[in-house]
Amino acid sequence: MKILAFNGSPRKGKWNTSTMLEQALDGARSAGAETELINLYQLDFKGCASCFACKCKDRDEIGVCALRDDLQPVLEKVRSADALLLGTPVYYGTESSAMRAFLERLQYPYLNYEDFSKSHFPRKVRTGLIYTMNVREDQLDAMGYPAVFERTRSYLAMHFGSCELVLANNTTQYPDYGKYEANASGEDKARYREEYFGGDCRRARELGIRLVS
Ligand SMILES: Cc1cc2nc3c(=O)[nH]c(=O)nc-3n(C[C@H](O)[C@H](O)[C@H](O)COP(=O)(O)O)c2cc1C
């Protein structure tokens, strides 16, 4: 059982998205999975080039992107993965640019234009989608975020079989709030993190375990 995870934040280490992903992968490993985390910002790749090689009727292989860059071997690994986990910070109300580019390349070769209900991905695998963001939970509806998350979740479910969401709100963005512009104090952010981030990480861990089952 191999789970492939993708970090759509440029920040690695102890930051929000990578921490949530590591928690999920730790849960998956505790349930017996082998895991691999890929940091998208370390790869040199672009989004879909609209070349339509993956839609050509006489193509050699179904579900293969023709672009040759750092994503090619990664997409090759996706073909044999048993579950996929994607994590991204919210940037301007949607996924980060690297995650958006990745989503295009990951999904479009499997999109069956003749029948959207029949994915070209040959199997059904579980997928998980983690978002971390500044906005508080009580602001989500007013910002229109649930519709954005649901659209991406449903596309992943359409291509791969199923997809579950986990969110972390009001995340800590700076190491020292005294040194940067902010609409909240470092004390308020630290208090919120202390109270809620542990629960977010627990939900991520439980998601990781469910990806294995
Ligand atoms: C370029 C940029 C745009 C952002 N836009 C939003 C946004 O629209 N909504 C939001 O809630 N947070 C926004 N944020 C905050 C991040 O989503 C949040 O801090 C996230 O948890 C960072 O994840 P990381 O610690 O893994 O990098 C933005 C941050 C950056 C750098």
Image: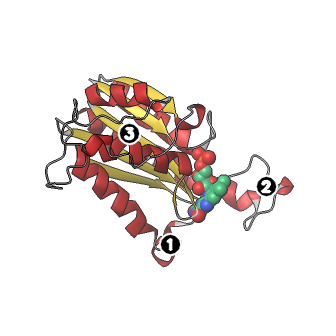
Front label number (3 vs 1) = 3
**Disc 3/disc 1 C-alpha distance (Å):** 26 Å
Mark closer to the observer (2, 3): 3
Residue 177 lies left or right of residue 58; in this view the side is right
Q: Residues within 10 Å of mark 3 (few under 14, many from 20)?
A: many
What type is the residue that disc 2 sits on? Tyr
Q: Where does label 3 land, which residue?
A: 85
Where is residue 203 shown, x and y percent of the image?
A: 40, 47
Alpha carbons under labels 1 and 2: distance apart: 22 Å
- Name which residue lies at 50% across and 28% down: 70
Residue picked out by circle 1 = 138
Q: 54 left or right of 189? A: left
Using the rendered view, name the quadrant where residue 65 is placed: top left
Q: Amino acid at mark 1?
A: Asp
Which one is earlier in the sequence, the residue at label 2 or at label 3?
3
Under tag 3, what secondary structure?
Answer: strand
Spot the residue most to the front. Answer: 58
Q: Say which amino acid is labelled 3.
A: Leu
Residue at (18% x, 56% y) in the render: 116
Circles 1 and 2: CB distance less than 8 Å?
no
* Residue 92 at x, y percent in the picture: 58, 63
- Which residue shows up at 33% across the image and 31% down it? 78
Mark 2 — residue?
A: 177
